[in-house]
Image (tube, rainbow, N blue to C red):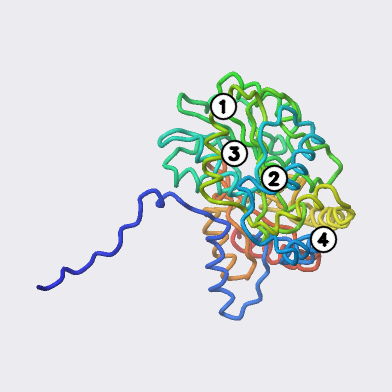
């Protein structure tokens, strides 16, 4: 009997909405590099691709764990020394009513687990525009709805509280805060955080507080953990070793659950079901958490010094004709506005092909309708940054002529 020709394996519809601009742009950059063009990368927030190195005392802790045969499974929530160190760090940040702590494969796994344990199909989560695209990707997989709220560029990229208030609907379950923010580098004011907490409490929302860049404050401005402002508010605080401790490839993150036990007990139990089902995060790498949080942090001073200088170059050069940039206060990102006649995605892709300067289009992070941006990562050394920005500005000048 003749076999019928296969139409191919059908992919799940839930994957159709998954877009991840940060990584999706890499394919185009790789194609361009094959032409022999010099490439200048402003696209990936990986410090270790540049002149930043993981602190030696963290490496030594992992090596010791490996040699001590700490190579089997760990408890699903993480090893005791790591959990104790994370809880103590959260307490130092002012977080009280800590109900649970768990270690995950990067902060992104913590976020995905917590969203999966909370949101049903068709329900919504408030996410910032601009913001990190992971949240939209996970919500697409869950067949849930991202409900964007805007950050106010005219107010230093602070959250627009009234927009948040308007966007809360009957199916909204949570609000995401990325503070310090990726991609803008903004640090949120305490007053804005208090207003958001009040909204969340009054509407029965969980707050997801993504604070992965809290060690990278560039100008001495105080970072406030939103969970510290109300011990009864249901907050999940995410952090990890990736950014502040310069170990993104280790994939070690964590979550801290705080608030009223009566309100969070069932939800936290669901989170732990998923934690147990996926076994554990990398066991040897977890042994770096305690020395990271409790050991010397002199490396942070040199890291911030370099980033501050590179931020200043970025702010200086990316405020010119056709481009304007709010001064980043933390992390290593800038999100300049473009005055261009074409969509920012088309502009960025043409820039990569013609100049070798690789950035990510602002629409990949979400932006107000009618505005156009790009995200620039200012991790490269100063001479590379200046060269990349000079090429970007020349390309912009030609496109606007």
N-term-proximal mark, 3 vs 2: 3
Q: Are marks 1 and 2 in contact (CB under 8 Å)?
A: no
Q: Are marks 3 and 1 in contact (CB under 8 Å)?
A: no
Q: Are marks 1 and 4 in contact (CB under 8 Å)?
A: no
On the image, the x and y values in percent for residue 138 come to 50, 46
On the image, the x and y values in percent for residue 130 come to 60, 43
Q: CA distance from mark 3 to mark 2?
A: 18 Å
Judging depth in this view, the residue of 369 and 51 nearest the camera is 51
Residue under the point 84% across and 58% down: 306
N-term-proximal mark, 3 vs 1: 3
Query: Residue reaching furthest top?
Result: 202
Q: Would you name the residue on which mark 4 appears?
A: 55
Q: Would you name the residue on which mark 1 appears?
A: 205
N-term-proximal mark, 1 vs 2: 1
Q: CA distance from mark 3 to mark 1?
A: 15 Å
Position of the N terminus, as image quadrant, is bottom left
N-term-proximal mark, 4 vs 2: 4
Q: Would you name the residue on which mark 3 appears?
A: 128
On the image, the x and y values in percent for residue 71 come to 66, 62
Task: Tell me the mark number nearer the camera, choosing from 3 and 4.
Answer: 4
Residue under the point 24% across and 64% down: 7
User: SS for tag 3?
Assistant: strand
Judging depth in this view, the residue of 375 and 178 nearest the camera is 178
């Amino acid at each position: 009997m003749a076999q019928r020709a296969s139409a191919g394996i059908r992919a799940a519809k839930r994957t159709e909405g998954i877009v991840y601009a940060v990584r999706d742009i890499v394919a185009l950059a790789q194609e361009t590099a094959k032409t022999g063009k010099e490439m200048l990368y402003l696209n990936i927030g990986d410090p270790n691709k540049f002149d930043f190195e993981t602190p030696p005392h963290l490496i030594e802790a992992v090596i010791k764990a490996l040699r001590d045969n700490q190579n089997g499974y760990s408890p699903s929530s993480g090893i005791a020394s790591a959990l104790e160190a994370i809880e103590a760090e959260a307490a130092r940040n002012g977080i009280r009513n800590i109900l649970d702590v768990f270690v995950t494969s990067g902060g992104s796994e913590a976020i995905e687990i917590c969203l999966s344990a909370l949101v049903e199909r068709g329900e919504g989560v408030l996410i910032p525009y601009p913001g990190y695209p992971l949240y939209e990707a996970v919500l697409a997989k869950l067949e849930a709805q991202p409900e964007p709220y805007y950050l106010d560029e005219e107010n230093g990229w602070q959250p627009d509280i009234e927009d948040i208030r308007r966007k809360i609907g009957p199916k909204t379950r949570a609000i995401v805060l990325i503070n310090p923010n990726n991609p803008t580098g903004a640090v949120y004011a305490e007053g804005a955080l208090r207003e958001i907490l009040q909204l969340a409490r009054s509407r029965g929302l969980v707050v997801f507080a993504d604070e992965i860049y809290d060690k990278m404050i560039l100008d001495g401005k105080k970072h406030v953990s939103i969970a510290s402002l109300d011990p009864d508010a249901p907050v999940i605080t995410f952090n990890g070793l990736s950014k502040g401790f310069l170990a993104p490839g280790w994939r070690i993150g964590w979550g801290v659950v705080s608030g009223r036990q009566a309100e969070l007990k069932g939800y936290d139990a669901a989170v732990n079901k998923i934690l147990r089902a996926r076994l554990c995060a990398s066991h040897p790498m977890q042994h770096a958490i305690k020395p990271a949080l409790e050991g010397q942090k002199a490396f942070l001073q040199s890291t911030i010094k370099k980033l501050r200088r590179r931020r200043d170059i970025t702010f200086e050069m990316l405020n010119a004709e056709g481009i304007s940039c709010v001064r980043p206060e933390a992390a290593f990102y800038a999100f300049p506005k473009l005055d261009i006649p074409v969509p920012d995605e088309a502009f960025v892709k043409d820039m990569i092909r013609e100049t070798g300067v690789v950035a990510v289009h602002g629409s990949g992070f979400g932006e107000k309708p009618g505005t156009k941006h790009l995200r620039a990562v200012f991790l490269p050394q100063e001479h590379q940054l200046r060269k990349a920005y000079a090429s970007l500005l020349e390309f912009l000048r030609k496109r606007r002529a």
